[in-house]
Amino acid sequence: MRIPLHLRFRHISRSTDDQQLAKTVFHLTGLYPKRISLFKAALTHSSMASRSKDRVPHNERLEFLGDAVIDLVMADLLFRKYPNRDEGFLTEMRAKAVSTKNHSSLSQRMGLAQLLQFDAIHQKTQLTASMQADVYEAFIAAIYLDRGYDAVHQFISQKIIGHYIDFDGEDSTRRCQKTFYPCLVLGWDFGGGRHGFFQKRSRTKCLHALFESRRAH
């Protein structure tokens, strides 16, 4: 018997944001998050630490871990895919796949960059390619810590390779699935929204838009 989606997340707090984020993680990965706090931290830039008197978990440490996990998974996939190619070829292919440019592109196309919370006012932080790449790497670390290495390997091999990265193409990002996400920037509630030239929308609405967009695919 198929379990209704809302019952699968009954261990998640009743916060609307947490429930919506859990659904978004599921539709991005096909995995049910056990510790939603890991994914919230993955989507939080260190500039948000100054926005609250309480310590706000952010994604710097997760980015460090995720970078290493991605390297290992990519090395394993390439090693198995090309049993007759030499170390130089494998190194070059991995370098293309795990570059900041490629991770930034993945972050945008998956919708992760649009969910990043950062302080664009007090710290005058701008959303850079490096920050976008960090979100993807931190998200991978969150999966690893939440569900283990096998889950990360499955996610990258089934959801990333062939959909966002093509090892056989000249450019490892040519066969990307491009999806439009209506929320350019997400303002999470830590005592104020983001301003400036960015479009302001609530976190819940943005998560809902991403959730519905991913479900449609």
Image (spheres, helix red, strand yellow):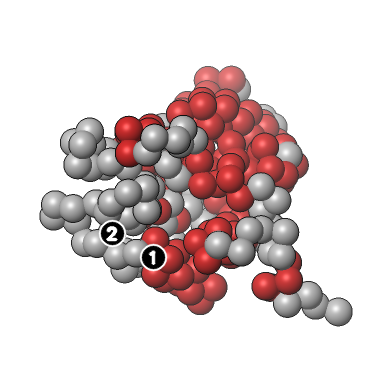
| Quadrant of the rendered image containing residue 158 | bottom right
In the image, residue 176 above or below residue 132? below
In the image, residue 117 above or below residue 61? below
Q: Would you say 53 lies left or right of 84 here? A: left
Q: Residues within 10 Å of mark 1 (few under 14, many from 20)?
A: many
Q: Residue at x 72, y 44 (%)?
A: 147
In the image, residue 2 above or below residue 138? below
Q: Residue at x 45, y 45 (%)?
A: 43
- Separation of marks 2 and 1 at Cα, in angstroms: 9 Å
Residue flagged by tag 2: what amino acid is it?
Leu
Residue flagged by tag 1: what amino acid is it?
Cys
Which structural element holds mark 2? Answer: loop
- Residue 184, label in figure: 2
Q: Would you say 52 lies left or right of 139 here? A: left
Disc 2 to disc 1: CB gap under 8 Å: no
> Could you say where residue 8 lies in the image, as x and y percent from the top left?
73, 67
Q: Would you say 178 lies left or right of 148 here? A: left
- Residue 217, label in figure: none
> Could you say where residue 62 lies in the image, as x and y percent from the top left?
53, 32
Dot 1 corresponds to which residue?
206
In the image, residue 210 above or below residue 135? below
Q: Would you say 75 lies left or right of 177 here? A: right
Visible residue check, residue 130 = no
| Quadrant of the rendered image containing residue 78 | top right
